[in-house]
Amino acid sequence: MRNNDRHQKIINLLCQRRSDTVQNLAADLGVCERTIRRDIEELTLTYPLETVRGRYGGGVRVADWYFQDRPKLSPKQTALLKRLAVGLQGEDLDEMNQILARFAS
């Protein structure tokens, strides 16, 4: 597996799992932990990854807000949220509008 392919696979796995250990990633990709650590170091320059110290080699997690393929609301879900927003005020309305802006199709 080439570096770019492995990097993309790491990002895909982390976006699905949200966090994982270096040991698990290495086993899943069939490489040594040192390779994963180098890959993660390189990926942190482009992606919002955070490394975590740990007893078994540590781990890595992706920022809560980051999604590779951002989930989208269906038209029915969007319509429901817009109907619910009518009764909201202040911070609640602001929060609902942010949800709609971020996830509505």
Image: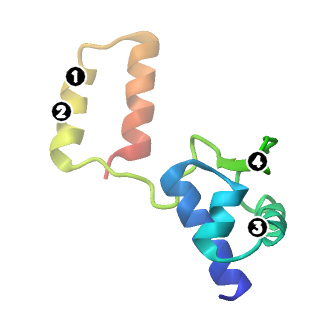
Amino acid type at image mark 3? Ile
Q: Residue furthest front?
A: 56
Give the residue at mark 1: 84
Q: Residue furthest bottom?
A: 2
Q: Quadrant of the N terminus?
A: bottom right
What separation in Å lies between label 3 and label 4 (alpha carbons)? Answer: 14 Å
Amino acid type at image mark 1? Leu
Q: Which mark is residue 10?
A: none
What separation in Å lies between label 3 and label 2 (alpha carbons)? Answer: 43 Å
Q: Which mark is residue 56?
A: 4
Q: Position of residue 23 (x, y in %)?
A: 70, 59
Say which residue appears at 77% left-offset and 47% top-offset. Answer: 58
What separation in Å lies between label 4 and label 1 (alpha carbons)? Answer: 46 Å
Work out whether mark 3 precedes mark 2 in sequence or the reverse, and give the earlier one. 3
Say which residue appears at 45% left-offset and 33% top-offset. Answer: 98
Work out whether mark 4 precedes mark 1 in sequence or the reverse, and give the earlier one. 4
Q: Position of residue 16 (x, y in %)?
A: 48, 55
Work out whether mark 3 precedes mark 4 in sequence or the reverse, and give the earlier one. 3
Q: Quick one: SS at disc 1?
A: helix
Give the residue at mark 2: 80
Q: Quick one: SS at disc 3?
A: helix
Instruction: Kindly report which numbered mark, 4 or 1, lies closer to the viewer in this rendering.
Output: 4
What separation in Å lies between label 2 and label 4 (alpha carbons)? Answer: 46 Å
Instruction: Kindly report which numbered mark, 3 or 4, lies closer to the viewer in this rendering.
Output: 4
Give the residue at mark 3: 36
Q: Is residue 98 left or right of residue 85?
A: right
Q: Assess whether mark 1 and mark 2 are in contact (beta carbons under 8 angstroms).
A: yes
Instruction: Kindly report which numbered mark, 1 or 3, lies closer to the viewer in this rendering.
Output: 3
Specify the quadrant of the image occupied by residue 102.
top left
Q: Nearer the viewer, residue 66 or 26?
A: 26
Up the image or down, 37 lies above or below 96; here it is below
